[in-house]
Image (cartoon, grey):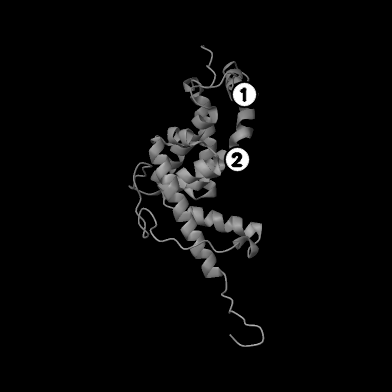
Amino acid sequence: MSTIQSVAGQDEQHPDVALVERVRAGDVSAYDTLVRKYERQLFRISQHITQNREDAEDVMQDAFLKAYEKLDQFQGNSKFYTWLVRIAVNESLMRLRKRRTGKMVSIDDDIVTEEGSMPRDFADWAPNPEQNYNQAELAEILKKTIQGLPEGFRLVFALRDVEGLSTEETAETLGLSVPAVKSRLLRARLQLRDRLTRYFKKKTPAVAPQVNGAEA
């Protein structure tokens, strides 16, 4: 069995590649190391797509199993994590297809929302919204707002901004061009900003102006 080449553009072999080599040599514990290393990330990505915790757990397990079965197909031309995420994304989309009877899901399709494919009018950010909400509340607000993004935008945003994949890795994972990823990411960020702004303005009570010594 041929030795995996190191990740392109790097002089040193990535630690994941060494673990994959050990798995191929029969060391199952090395795969357990990879699972523990990436299970949380894969679960989050799967949940971003399926919008369901139980489905995300199933997808995560299926993705790790399929990656193990297809380990010989990993050539080391990309990061193992990127290759793994691609499998999880495909499994998640397949899960959605089964859930939505007869409705196909394609990451290449542009999704039109009530606001249009890109928001046109943006209100200014509410000043220091963190002052009105604690960290836990903000995290929940952000989570729900991300879930409300159109699927194509949400997936790009989750991989690029939440999970920290590079633009190139996101494009490779989703089978998109780099310009397409950049376009969807911009539109996702704009929609997210607009929705958060409207949320905070709706939730923040207006304060009547006061004039010292007299009524306004």
Q: Position of residue 64 (x, y in %)?
A: 54, 32
Q: Is residue 150 above or below residue 35?
A: below
Q: Position of residue 30 (x, y in %)?
A: 63, 24
Mark 1 is on which residue type? Pro
Residue 134 in view: yes
Q: Nearer the viewer, residue 183 or 63?
A: 183
Q: Which of the labelled discs sits on residue 15, or is there none?
A: 1
Q: Is residue 210 above or below residue 8?
A: below
Instruction: Tell me the SS state at disc 1.
Output: helix
CA neighbours of label 2 inside 10 A, class few (<14), some (14 to 19), many (20+): few
**Residue sticking out furthest to the bottom:** 214
Q: Position of residue 62 (x, y in %)?
A: 51, 35
Q: Which of the labelled discs sits on residue 168, or is there none?
A: none
Q: Nearer the viewer, residue 30 or 141?
A: 141
Please name which of the two marks, 2 or 1, marks the residue nearer to the observer: 1
Residue depicted at 48% across the width and 33% down the height: 169
Q: Nearer the viewer, residue 110 or 27?
A: 110
CA–CA distance between discs 2 and 1? Answer: 19 Å
Instruction: Tell me the SS state at disc 2.
Output: helix
Mark 2 is on which residue type? Arg
Q: Is residue 212 above or below residue 44?
A: below
Q: Nearer the viewer, residue 131 or 155?
A: 131
CA neighbours of label 1 inside 10 A, class few (<14), some (14 to 19), many (20+): few
Q: Which residue is mark 2?
A: 40
Between discs 2 and 1, the one toward the N terminus = 1
Residue depicted at 67% across the width and 87% down the height: 213
Q: Are marks 2 and 1 in contact (CB under 8 Å)?
A: no
Q: Position of residue 128 (x, y in %)?
A: 60, 61
Q: Quadrant of the C terminus?
A: bottom right
Residue depicted at 62% across the width and 82% down the height: 211
